[in-house]
Image: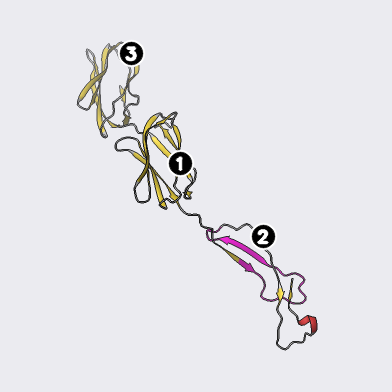
Amino acid sequence: YMVLVPFLIHTESPGKVCVQLTHLNESVTLSATLEYQGENRSLIDDVVSEKDVFTCIPFSLPKSNSTSVAFLTVGVKGPTLQFRSRKSVLVQNSESLVFVQTDKPIYKPGQTVLFRIVSLDKDFYPLNEKVKLRFFDPQRNRVYQWQGVELETGLTQLSFPLTSDPIQGSYKIVVQKSFSSHVEHSFRVEEYVLPKYEVLVKLPKMITIKDKELPVSVCGLYTYGKPVPGLVNVQVCRKFSHSASNCYGKEAEAVCE
């Protein structure tokens, strides 16, 4: 014989225990009992006459306050054949997977925060459920809340307008699924500041009158490393010198091109 039971069972989800009997030469009584939260529940109590049997018995468990253990007992009894198998199974409440997404990570004062909430079951299918939402500012003040939000087909999209002079910093969206289970998502509110950048110019230290071209490289980079788009105007000048020179007339004047 062989008894197959899962290692882990989620509450309010279909589970099953499977029994295989082979080479039977007599009729036997197959029974299965589930022990959970101090109660015994009979899952099957049938007479089996076939020589080879493979059967699965479905069952489900109600929600519990915490993770617990259930026991499955399978027994076979006949005129000459008897055996009994008792297996322990870990039981956990079936928890949904909830994801929160905002349309951008940083907002300016006065903008509207657009966000969506997605709920999936343990098999990643959309799950309909009700949740409670709360908004907290950087000082942990509750600035807004929604009660009993319906996630139809596992999705809802909401918005929240920021004031023209909000507290700047990290805000938090808290999705309350049950009394002890919640999901958090953060975003920031900041005043817009023009990004800083630097301009790097590369050119040779010296040129001669024989050089027909002057290689010049100009590179603008933001402080975070990305290039700065724009137009560059380059002027090359020959400075006028009061010192002694072999150049006279216009050749000694400053020139810019």
> Up-down: is 77 above or below 103?
above
Q: Position of residue 30 (x, y in %)?
A: 27, 16
Q: Quadrant of the N terminus?
A: top left
User: Magenta segment, which residues?
Assistant: 200-225
Q: Residue at x 77, y 75 (%)?
A: 210
Q: Are marks 3 and 1 in contact (CB under 8 Å)?
A: no
Q: Is residue 165 left or right of residue 25?
A: right
Mark earlier in primary sequence (3, 1): 3
Instruction: Left or right? Give the position of 115 relative to 219.
Output: left
Q: Residue furthest left?
A: 38
Few, some or many residues within 10 Å of mark 1 (<14, 14–19, 20+):
some
Give x and y (percent) for residue 104.
Answer: 49, 46
Q: Which residue reaches farthest bottom?
A: 244
Nearer to the camera, 29 or 151: 151
Q: Secondary structure at mark 1?
A: strand
Secondary structure under the numbered disc 3 in the rendered image: loop
The Cα atoms of the two marked residues, 2 and 1, are separated by 37 Å
Q: Circle 2 sits in a helix, a strand or a loop, which is it?
A: loop
**Amino acid at the residue labelled 2:** Leu
Q: Measuring from the top left, give residue 161's x and y in whole percent.
A: 45, 43
Nearer-the-camera pick, 166 or 252: 166
- Give how far apart the Cα atoms at labels 3 and 1 are: 57 Å
Any magenta on residue 137?
no
Residue at 66%, 75% (x, y): give it.
205
Indicate the position of residue 149 as horizontal and vertical percent values. 39, 33
Of pointers 2 and 3, the one earlier in the residue sequence: 3
Which numbered mark, 2 or 3, is in the foreground of this view? 2
Name which residue type carries label 1.
Gln
Which residue does the numbered mark 1 point to in the structure image? Answer: 101
Q: What residue does disc 2 label?
A: 231
The residue wearing badge 3 is 51
